[in-house]
């Protein structure tokens, strides 16, 4: 369609010349102006319609392509492994999702259009010149080859400069984001100057390639313009002074085509360069499509029956886990059985694998071995189904910006009384009623309180943990895992929470709690002691305390409130 349009455009120029030449061969009165005018108008109209149609088609096509690319990109990030998210700087993902996606949506699609248009027009222009001055093929081709070699030199200088600029952009964002997240510490240590200096250095690094990039543009501009001038002047001299019998009209036509051709040369190189740069965005986004993904291969395998899980029974056989496929093993051959409704405490020194075990149960890290949740092996289960049936409250709870209600119940599935019950069970109201003088009506948290998520949260860590607990209670799953969920909550509130959990959770709800503070899990049914990724003790607290030289007993004996812990068991 673009070729048709370019031919049409050439035809228009030729037709004007042909029309004017009619006045040379016959009297003006016998030239039918209306006929020539209507043919010319017809050519214009058809050119306009062809162009509009082609452009509309292109636009819709590119929107569709953008949608597909964007969807695959977001899908890929959403299903990537935790490992990948851990090791990839967020600022880089943000640049991909904003600047690169914008390039693909906008500049790249339009750039390719312009490139095709310019190439086709140049081809038709050169072809038209050859009709009237075939001798000019040789100089034409020579000049085109010279222009191409200049273009290549230009591109090999310009591309790395531009690439450097785009690579140096993410570090600026990264430093800025880090500065905003750590603003309090930066101010406290008086390190503003250091951050400012770092910021300026990164901005400098980003801008530095700008000047040479500009100069390289001037370099190519001068050369290509000179070539274009030589080509047009030589063609003009040949057509005017040469002995070739070309009519004035056709000479004019050829000159128009030559000027069109040469003025497009530089534009073509620029568009090509810009498009190649924009295509880098496509390349970068494509890289993010082939990252490590969570194992979705089994998603179609096992669809559990609707009543699953009917109980919270958990059977683990030979479970091993690592953080990456080639990383060291952090859990070694764990085998244990948890009856439905049991409350299990997991204790162990820092780094003993407690959090890793909770992640392994959710298949958030690569595992081997077997985990049966209510009789169904989780290995082949669809990940969405598995995770929506296990509730976990992680060590560092994440809240989302919005009201407290939207945090507890993001899909608006429960009524307020249910949400308030959950908040009560999680200990929020007990906490707020203790210090009446501290908690005025304004500072009390309620379902409508606004919460800021992310790094700028307006809640204390303890308050956040309480909300995360309430959120876990609302979900009503048969298996609940708390990873240090109450570590920042005071003793008294913690024991109240444990008390309510004991009474409020159904008899078939299994609770697994990771705790550093032994008092939290002292009255649980059984305690699992982990050490370097292995279970070294797993029994009721009472029996563990009776075991001479036991690790758990050692931990209890070391702790300051030893007497209280013993009293809790007896
Ligand atoms: N994101 C990670 N990538 C690689 N290795 C990790 C990662 N997180 C933890 N590990 C390793 O896994 C092992 C167990 O860590 P884990 O977080 O399970 O300990 P933990 O018992 O929960 O400790 P804590 O009491 O401090 O929370 C450690 O040796 C640690 O180095
Ligand atoms: Mg942990």
Image (cartoon, rainbow, N blue to C red):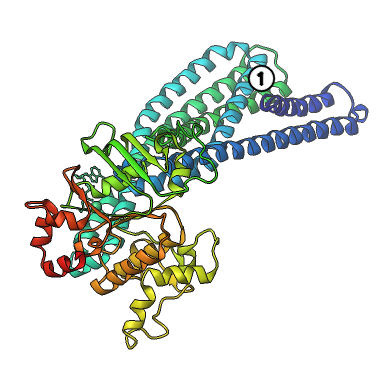
Can you say whether 426 is above or below 173 in the image?
Answer: below
- Residue 485 located left or right of residue 281: left
Identity of the residue furthest to the bottom in this view = 437
- Cβ of mark 1 under 8 Å from ligand 1: the answer is no
* Figure quadrant of the N terminus: top right
Q: Position of residue 459 (x, y in %)?
A: 34, 70
Q: Nearer the viewer, residue 388 or 550?
A: 550
Q: Position of residue 163 (x, y in %)?
A: 36, 37
- Residue 162 located left or right of residue 419: left
Can you say whether 176 is above or below 102 in the image?
Answer: below
Q: Position of residue 551 (x, y in %)?
A: 11, 51
- Name the residue carrying label 1: 128
Q: What residue is at 37 percent from the left and 36 percent from the top?
A: 216
Q: What residue is at 11 percent from the left and 64 percent from the top?
A: 559
- Residue 34 located left or right of residue 299: right
Q: Nearer the viewer, residue 295 or 121?
A: 295
Q: Position of residue 533 (x, y in %)?
A: 20, 42
* Figure quadrant of the C terminus: bottom left
Q: Nearer the viewer, residue 419 or 544?
A: 544
Identity of the residue furthest to the right in this view = 30
Q: Nearer the viewer, residue 276 or 570?
A: 570
| Residue 82 showing in the rendered view | no
Q: What residue is at 31 percent from the left and 40 percent from the top?
A: 316
Choose top left, top right, bottom left or bottom right for residue 376: top left
| Residue 252 showing in the rendered view | yes
């Amino acid at each position: 369609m673009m070729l048709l349009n370019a031919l049409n455009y050439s035809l228009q120029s030729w037709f004007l010349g042909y029309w004017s030449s009619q006045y040379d061969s016959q009297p003006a009165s016998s030239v039918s102006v209306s006929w020539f005018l209507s043919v010319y108008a017809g050519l214009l109209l058809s050119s306009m319609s062809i162009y509009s149609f082609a452009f509309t088609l292109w636009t819709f096509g590119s929107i569709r392509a953008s949608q597909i690319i964007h969807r695959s990109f977001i899908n890929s990030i959403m299903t990537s492994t935790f490992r990948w998210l851990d090791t990839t700087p967020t600022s880089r993902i943000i640049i991909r999702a904003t600047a690169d996606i914008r390039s693909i949506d906008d500049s790249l699609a339009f750039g390719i259009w312009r490139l095709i248009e310019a190439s086709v027009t140049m081809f038709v222009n050169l072809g038209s010149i050859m009709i009237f001055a075939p001798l000019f093929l040789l100089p034409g081709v020579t000049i085109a080859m010279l222009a191409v070699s200049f273009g290549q030199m230009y591109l090999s200088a310009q591309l790395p400069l531009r690439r450097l600029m785009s690579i140096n952009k993410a570090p600026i964002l990264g430093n800025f984001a880090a500065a905003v997240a750590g603003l309090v510490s930066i101010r406290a240590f008086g390190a503003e100057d250091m951050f400012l200096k770092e910021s300026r250095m990164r901005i400098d690094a980003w801008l530095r390639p700008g000047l040479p990039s500009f100069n390289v543009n001037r370099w190519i501009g001068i050369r290509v313009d000179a070539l274009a001038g030589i080509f047009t002047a030589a063609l003009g001299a040949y057509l005017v002074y040469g002995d070739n019998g070309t009519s004035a009209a056709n000479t004019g036509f050829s000159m128009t085509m030559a000027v069109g051709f040469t003025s497009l040369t530089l534009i073509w190189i620029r568009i090509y360069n810009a498009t190649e740069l924009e295509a880098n965005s496509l390349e970068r986004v494509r890289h993010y499509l082939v990252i490590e993904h969570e194992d979705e291969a089994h998603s179609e395998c096992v669809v559990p029956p609707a009543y699953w899980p009917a109980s919270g029974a958990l059977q683990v056989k030979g479970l091993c886990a690592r953080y990456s496929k080639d990383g060291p093993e952090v859990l070694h051959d764990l085998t244990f059985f948890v009856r439905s409704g049991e409350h299990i405490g997991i204790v162990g020194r820092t780094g003993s694998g407690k959090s890793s075990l909770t992640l392994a149960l959710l298949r958030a890290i690569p595992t081997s071995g077997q985990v049966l949740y209510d009789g169904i092996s989780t290995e082949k289960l669809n990940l969405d189904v598995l995770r929506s049936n296990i509730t976990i409250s992680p060590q560092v709870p994440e809240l989302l910006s919005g009201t407290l209600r939207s945090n507890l119940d993001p899909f608006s599935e429960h009524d307020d009384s249910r949400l308030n019950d959950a908040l009560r069970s999680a200990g929020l109201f007990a906490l707020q009623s203790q210090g009446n003088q501290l908690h005025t009506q304004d500072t009390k948290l309620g379902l409508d309180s606004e919460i800021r998520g992310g790094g700028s949260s307006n809640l204390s860590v303890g308050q956040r943990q309480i909300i995360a607990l309430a959120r876990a209670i609302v979900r009503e799953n048969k298996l609940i895992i708390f990873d240090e969920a109450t570590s920042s909550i005071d003793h008294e509130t913690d024991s109240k929470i444990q008390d309510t959990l004991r009474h409020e959770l159904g008899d078939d709800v299994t609770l697994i709690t990771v705790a550093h503070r032994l008092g939290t899990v002292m009255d649980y049914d059984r305690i699992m002691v982990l050490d370097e990724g292995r279970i070294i003790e797993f029994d009721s607290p009472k029996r563990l305390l009776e075991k001479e030289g036991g690790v758990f007993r050692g931990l209890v004996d070391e702790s300051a409130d030893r007497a209280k812990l013993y009293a809790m068991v007896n």
